[in-house]
Image (cartoon, rainbow, N blue to C red):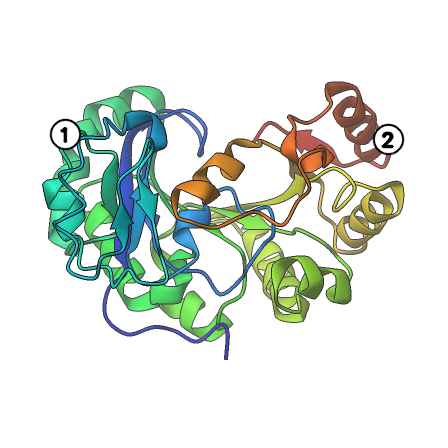
Amino acid sequence: MASEIRSGRPLIIDIKGNSLDDGPGTRSVVFMKGCPLNCAWCQNPESKKIAPELWFETDKCVSSGECVPACPEGALGPGDPLVIDRDKCTLCFDCVAACPSTALRRVGQDMTVEQVVAKIAPYKPFFDTTGGGVTLSGGEPTLFMEFTSQLLQALKQEGIPTLVETAGLFNFDAFAELVLPYCDIIYMDIKLIDPELHKRWCGVDNTRIKENFIRLHQMAASGGFSIKPRTPLIPGLTDTDQLMADLAGFYLAHGVKLAALEKNNPIWFDKSEKVGVEPDFAPDDPARGFYDNERYALIKKYFEDQGITILES
């Protein structure tokens, strides 16, 4: 099952120290590796796979050639920039150790809860001053429910507010037991309402996602935590008039009065190439550009005319 809970702990992609974009106040963001969805427009394509990956930044490559003989599989070839045969690569990362410029690096580091907390703890004064905290992101934090629970509990013991970003495809009972008691805020993605379109563009049906959101939204009314639904605006894929009407109808049917709309940010195309993935979009596809501000304003007005306040994401 795509939403099964993984045992063990996730690889950590990064811990971003001073973020102003992933929740209220100044935040540290923990990016976990692995996701049960496969969204065509994923903003963090390096987070999809559970396993580590080789990241290559061509603009950092100095073409020294030192990494080429370091590869035991002969997967690297000299060039400007370096040539990588990813079919041959076994992810031994010997090339990373040999790279003099950090153009090559490993994505996904093994860290314990204690190591993650130790890296975050120095930022607590900023959290206290700004009303911030820690955001768990990814990837999908609920894919590793037990690790996420332990990390949230450890953060709570340090007096640090917590926020979980999720695509919503999880076992609800496990989430309610292991994550929800230690989570102050939930940001949950509602990417598309139609299950077939969701499966086409995100790789999975969204029935469970919608069910989980409805239950959490109803529970949030009693207090203890808050939940904010978010929808990415991908030109022509998620933002058509009909799809926006479907989304507004879903929110109104379940009493949702606050939501967020996220403008497409094309930096993910460059990130895909760094892990050796060619995005499935033509060079002139609108999804490769920044979102049109006038279109965003029209959509925002449409929702607010329906009585749904659009929050800044």
* Horizontal relation, residue 147 to residue 263: left or right: left
Residue 9 visible = yes
Residue 209, given in percent of the width and then of the height, sits at 61, 64
Name the one closer to the observer, 295 or 217. Answer: 295
**Which amino acid, by three-letter code, is at mark 2?**
Asp
Residue 49, given in percent of the width and then of the height, sits at 39, 60
* Horizontal relation, residue 30 to residue 96: left or right: right
Name the one closer to the observer, 177 or 297. Answer: 297
Q: Nearer the viewer, mark 1 or mark 2?
A: 1
Please say if 52 is above or below 1: above
Residue 132 visible = no
Residue denoted by label 1:
122
The answer to which quarter of the image holds residue 219 is bottom right
Extreme-bottom residue of the structure: 1
Please say if 82 is above or below 312: below
Residue 14, given in percent of the width and then of the height, sits at 28, 41
Q: How many marks?
A: 2
Please say if 304 is above or below 209: above
Q: At 28% from the left edge and 27% from the top edge, which residue is drawn?
A: 60
Q: SS for tag 1?
A: helix
Q: At 88% from the left edge and 47% from the top edge, which residue is drawn?
A: 242
* Horizontal relation, residue 12 to residue 260: left or right: left
Name the one closer to the observer, 244 or 66. Answer: 66
Q: Earlier in the sequence, mark 1 or mark 2?
A: 1
The answer to which quarter of the image holds residue 298 is top right
**Which amino acid, by three-letter code, is at mark 1?**
Pro
The answer to which quarter of the image holds residue 80 is top left
Residue denoted by label 2:
305
